Image (cartoon, rainbow, N blue to C red):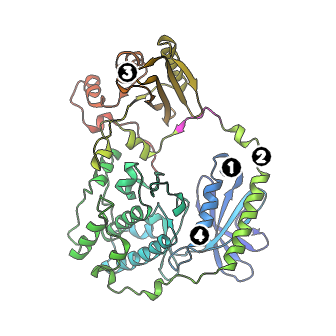
Amino acid sequence: MESKGSVLMQRYEVGKLLGQGTFAKVHHARNLETGASVAIKIVDKEKIFKVGMMEQIKREISVMRMVRHPNIVQLYEVMASKTKIYIVMEYAKGGELFNKVAKGKMKGDVARKYFQQLISAVDFCHSRGVYHRDLKPENLLLDDNGNLKITDFGLSALAESKRQDGLLHTTCGTPAYVSPEVINRRGYDGAKADIWSCGVILYVLLSGYLPFHDSNLMEMYRKICQAEFTYPKWFSSDACKLISKILDPNPNTRIPISKIMGTHWFRKGFNLKSAKPHEDTGLRDLEAKAADDAIFDHCENAANTTAEAKQESSKLTNLNAFDIISFSSGFDLSGLFEGSDQKSESRFTSMQPAQTIITKLEDIARKLKLKLTKKDGGCLKLEGSKLGRKGVLSIDAEIFEVTPAFHLVEMKKSNGDTLEYRKMMKQEIRPALKDIAWIWQGDELQQAEQKEGQPADMHSCQIPPLAVN
């Protein structure tokens, strides 16, 4: 293990720990040849192989090589040992912008400078087909001169990640900074989602607090989806106009970066030359990329081939905050954007262990003479034995783990007639699940009243609290 004062690869003297995550640590270090300070991200190979994060690390490095800009943390080199990957980056001595925000609101000119640098860097990323997808003050660093530096491209996406509809579909980011269309889970434009996050950041810089905040996560998402927030009295009219155009819940009418940069508020004191990207390094970058590929090829060949076998085929899908909000019944966020979509699906939550839920579904299948097939990841398929109006009725069931003691089960028709599906769910399956189902979609308020003996509100039917990253 690398410790303070140790020498890495005969090139860097490792210094103090700057930050630590589940799979990596970031240390300050000194280049022994030049004496320059750097930050080294030390990634544990075994851990990232086990959780399938190698592609994410490779993408992060690839993206950092593409986006060389004065306001983006620069990647210097990538090295590897038998057990670690070392990502050597520019050291931002000023720390996180978040630390300044935590002290309270900033003066207008200071906030404007940071926002100008942020927008310039994000615009450059977009010009290279890169979408950050996790912009927030914690991922904005400051150098010796107080200039902003975007970091942490671990959740970034490239233009080629888009599906045939031209949109991105992976729901990710930090809840308070994500755009309504990301929450909506119907596909989104990465550039427009980044712009929304920049708007939230600008509000935070000027006010010292978030525009959308609530101890009830669902209520916070409702506010985001409806852009429900107020302006402090000290905001200038120009700042309010700009923020209102950025925090537009409709991505189709949200202001683009080109127009943001053309507003009177943004142009004040803006130095275009200072935001000029670094020159393209051409061949040097190609050589560096080839070296990166060699490192990762070696990592993959050296990986224990039994790693995949260690992953339990029956491991349940883990829900993040976005999934939970999307699945939460009685609160369909998609209705805020488009007409309701009548899907042939039902969901219920259960306080029972996953195996108990699976056993119950097996019992129901036997009773109803349905063929039950188990798949990976807590998925099951129930198929009828007779032809219906539109073929054989087939129902897919998937169990999601919210916490070890709390599960969400989604059941949806994958084949057959919708009316037959609904009839079977209402008359056979739902009654048979009454012993293990806590709340069915759409039943929260009614069941809460029955259980508590008093009128229910949104807080009374919340799922158990969980950490949101």
Report the span colored magenta.
Answer: 312-317
The answer to whether marks 1 and 2 mark residues whose Cβ atoms lie closer than 8 Å is yes
Q: Is the residue 35 above or below the residue 361 in the image?
A: below
Query: What is the x, y in percent for residue 36?
Result: 66, 81
Give the number of the mark in front: 1 or 3.
Answer: 3
**Which residue does the numbered mark 2 point to in the structure image?**
304
Image side of residue 441 versus residue 233, left or right:
right
Element on which disc 3 rests:
helix
Q: Report crowding for label 1: few under 14, some 14 to 19, many 20 or more residues within 10 A (C-alpha).
A: some
Query: What is the x, y in percent for residue 107?
Result: 32, 77
Residue 100 in view (yes/no): yes
Image side of residue 314 versus residue 81, left or right:
left
List the single residue furthest toward the top. 367
**Which residue does the numbered mark 4 point to in the structure image?**
64
Q: Is the residue 124 above or below the residue 54 in the image?
A: below
- Three-letter residue code for mark 3: Glu
**Which residue does the numbered mark 1 point to in the structure image?**
49
**Which residue does the numbered mark 3 point to in the structure image?**
420
Query: What is the x, y in percent for residue 294?
Result: 76, 64
The answer to whether marks 3 and 2 mark residues whose Cβ atoms lie closer than 8 Å is no
Query: What is the x, y in percent for residue 399?
Result: 50, 31
Q: Report crowding for label 4: few under 14, some 14 to 19, many 20 or more residues within 10 A (C-alpha).
A: many
Q: Quadrant of residue 110?
A: bottom left
- Measure the alpha-carbon separation of dots 4 and 1: 21 Å
* Residue at the image position 73 percent from the left and 69 percent from the top: 290
Q: Main secondary structure of the magenta part?
A: loop
Element on which disc 1 rests:
helix
Foreground residue, 332 or 22?
Answer: 332
Residue 1 in view (yes/no): no
Q: Earlier in the sequence, mark 1 or mark 3?
A: 1
- Measure the alpha-carbon separation of dots 3 and 2: 49 Å
